[in-house]
Image (cartoon, helix red, strand yellow):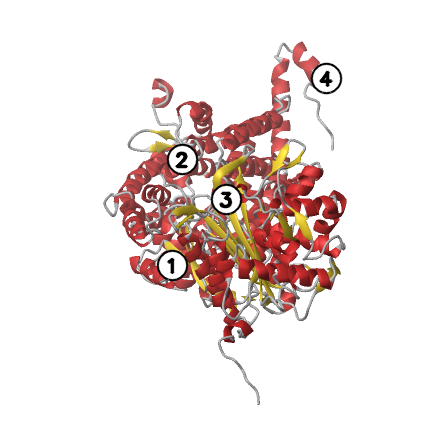
Amino acid sequence: MTEMVYGALPVQSGEPILPKWWRTLDKWTMSSILMLFVIGLLLGLAASVPLAERNGFGNFHYVQRQMVFGLTALAAMIITSMMSPTLVRRLAVVGFICAFVALALLPVFGTDFGKGAVRWYSLGFASLQPSEFLKPGFIVVAAWMIAASQQINGPPGTLMSFGLCMTVVLMLVMQPDFGQACLVLFGWGVMYFVAGAPMLLLVAMAVVVVLGGILAYNSSEHFARRIDGFLNPEIDPTTQMGYATNAIREGGLFGVGVGEGQVKWSLPDAHTDFIIAVAAEEYGLVLVVILILLYATVVARSLFRLMRERDTFIRLAGTGLVCTFGVQAMINMGVAVRLLPAKGMTLPFVSYGGSSLIAGGIAVGMLLAFSRSRPQGEIADYLNGRGRG
Amino acid sequence: MIRTPLRPLARILTARANGENPDVIERENLRQRHAEMQAASRQRAEGRLLVLGVFFLVAFTAIAVRMGALATSEAVEPVASTAGGSGIAMQRADIVDRKGRILATNFETHSLYAQPPQMVDPEGAVERLVEIFPDLDRDRLLEDFTGKRKFVWIKKKISPEQKQAVHDIGDPGLLFGPREMRLYPNGSLAAHVMGGAGFGKEGVTAAEVIGVAGVEKQFDDYLRDPANGGRPLQLSLDLTVQAASEQVLLGGMKLMNAKGATSVLMDVYTGEVISVVSLPDFDPNDRPRPPTSGFDPSVSPLFNRAVQGVYELGSTFKIFTAAQAVDLGLVNSETIIDTSGPMRIGRFPIGEFNNKNYGKLSVADIIVNSSNRGTGRLALQIGAERQQQFLRALGMFDPTPIEIVEASGGQPLKPKKWGELSTVTISYGHGLSTSPMHLAAGYAAIANGGRYVSPTILRQTGPQLGDRVMSEDAAAQARAMLRKVVTSGTASFGEVPGYQVGGKTGTADKPKPRGGYYESKVIATFAAMFPAHDPKYVLIVTLDEPSVIAHGEERRTAGWTAVPVAGEMIGRIAPLLGLRPQVEPDQITGITLTSN
């Protein structure tokens, strides 16, 4: 009666934010990410020491930095994961525009750190790689466009997103950064696939990729040498691949012991692209399998949750994010065991690198936001006789 | 499936009639349609997401399995693939002399390279490396080691001692690659014949050895052909004779203050070159770089004076004129020729050395006294046509066929227009430039009884006599004249007791590069054969710009320079060649034999 007299009490519309967040969160994915980060720090203790020594810092200089970046990344991840999908989308669009502008201005203000490719902004204490931040933003924007195209009387979003994708890929290739370009292309392709790409087109694309590969093999000596090196069953022991293979062998099942590994001294990219070799050598197959399980968990769990998702945008964006995450891990580890030709790519959350870590945190935060359980109208389906088939 | 229109006309009309907003109906239908589409697209997406999930699980499983297989596999000895696909053929055949002694062989050695990313202490390594190899450039090396380079060649060939020293630096970034290296155990001996070898296709683990000059280049295909089963290439050279020749010639060159010297020793029946020397020389183990442009290549140590260098060889050519004249039946060695001057061909006076005037001389004495006018008169009788035929038959117009790659560069220089003047000057060796090897082949024809032999550097099994160029009798008369030059002519210093040397001197003014002749620069040549009564060998000794003070005056003529060197050389090499010294009859004239 009181309510009838005094109007509704000012109750909150739903339950409090934190409990709701915790209830709807995909805790498996979140825990996996946290464990990956911890393992990354652990490996960093071993793998980044030679680099620190080479550059004249204290032994654990890079571990400390990784810790700082990692905590920032985790904070970003948790904050992002608390947002609603709409808010995430809005912020991602803003973020994408910023990253896009930053990427476009790289040739003017960027630096190549003597590595031959202008990919970074130097901020003095740290460097910033805009392409890392561009990736999640792009995925969300493209997902939004594709989802919009599926509305009745919607814009031609698929075509627009394809144009955007090509623009970004072109800019990345100009740097040149083929790895990131491939990831962006892959992310868009996966979303297009899930959004219902015609089968005929997929087959045609596969043919084009094969033909393009053959063309690249015949026209680019650099590319051909990589492929030849990959196809050659014998490994030159003085190459990175040779060192990585040796390290994995040395490690065996349980590793040579913490800090006993040798490969980190010979591999210049031991703390980034070949950190899996360090893991395999010092901790053995056990840790590698754990790592693989963690990545597989993140991918499988997220995809499973997205399968139930009814909202096209959320499904597409989530799929794009988790697949780029998964494929990055896959390529990194596949290269180390020679299942794939050599291509520099970081292992998400494990490899050293501020930009990739923080951007990864944001991306996974978005993924968590998208994969939170929310009412999917199952009961309505049931009542309408459209039960899940 | 019944498709509901977004704006069903019946409901719209009813709504309008009732005063309701018909758009609500449209929105309601739109929402419903979207819900249906979403359900449909989710169904499709479910399947595709499942495909994606399976793809990732399969990929991760594959990686895990592969990782497991790698981790549990035994480490096998890594075998690096050879670079470039096709393997590098090893085992270049040896080169041996006529008695099977090694002239060139292969030697296991190492190359030294660096992988700067693996280096522990680049600065320290540079310091130590520069100590071991003083010719390395410290700054350049430091830049290479500390820069972006992943791979740096440091030395292509290092000795075992150097390898140990580098090993002692102990830097893991300094690595050795096995190398098969061409070794010339005799050092600079026969350097110009050997030429040298270098690396062709090069990998870290092996390198291809290819010939870059001399017989190494000429017979590169043969030496590398695995079908030969490593059979050595046997040359006609004799190691000991070659060594003696080089020693004597080097001493002679210094004694005579010459800036260059060359000698050719040739078997007159087979054409085999027993020794060939060109000084200054070089060490084929460490072949110097060819001279850069702007520098006369013919004074480079790499220049093979014996086969590449073409010179006006002067009076040594007179014997060809005399031999031809005898062969044609125009004269015999006793025919008297008036050599008195003056003699003019057109406006060009033909003079004698030191403006002498010999008067009437026999043909033999023309050779002995080296009379220009005498041979000129003989040449005028022979005529340009026949003179050219004769010289062409002796091989004087083409590069020598000897199998040294540089020989093809020894193209003789002959006058464009072979007139009367040319006929006369060429009769005494001016106006036609040939290499000492050409001269050796020409003298061999006189020595062996009138047959052309083609000079060769390969071991021959028997006489290789070619076309007849003059009669036996003409050759014999020419040999007698040559012997007389030594016994009583300009080459008296060439007499070697017991070996009956015959020969002819030649002193030719050197042409200036821009035309005309130097006053005091000569090419002094002695073309000899021994033993004169039955010659087996021809020896050509040529000195470039010799000058010696004797009897109080500077002397440049061959008789004072090239001849004593050749005499000394014959004295040294004739015993090595197995020639028995002939005790000459006039040496025992002091004893009167009596009978009964």
Residue A268 visible in rendering: no
| In the image, residue A286 above or below residue A159 | below
In the image, are marks 2 and 1 on the same chain? yes
Q: Earlier in the sequence, mark 4 or mark 3?
A: 4
| In the image, residue B14 above or below residue A178 | above
Q: Position of residue A105 (x, y in %)?
A: 44, 23
* Distance (Cα) linking label 2 and label 1: 28 Å
* Distance (Cα) linking label 1 and label 3: 78 Å
Mark 4 lies on residue: B10
Instruction: In the rendered structure, find residue A359 and report the number of the disc placed on it.
Output: 2
- Badge 4 sits on which subunit? B
Q: Earlier in the sequence, mark 2 or mark 1?
A: 1
Mark 1 lies on residue: A281
Nearer to us in this view, A252 or B48: A252
Q: Position of residue B538 (x, y in %)?
A: 59, 61
In the image, are marks 4 and 2 on the same chain? no
Which numbered mark, 2 or 1, is in the foreground of this view? Answer: 1
Q: Are marks 4 and 2 in contact (CB under 8 Å)?
A: no
* Residue type, numbered disc 3: Val
Q: Are marks 1 and 3 in contact (CB under 8 Å)?
A: no
Nearer to us in this view, B30 or A96: A96
Quadrant location of residue B475? bottom right
Q: Position of residue A282 (x, y in %)?
A: 35, 58
* Distance (Cα) linking label 4 and label 1: 76 Å
* Residue type, numbered disc 4: Ala
Instruction: In the rendered structure, find residue A211 and report the number of the disc placed on it.
Output: none
* Residue type, numbered disc 2: Ala
Instruction: In the rendered structure, find residue B522 and report the number of the disc placed on it.
Output: 3
> Badge 1: few (under 14), some or many (20 or more) residues near its Cα, within 10 Å?
many
Secondary element at tag 3: strand
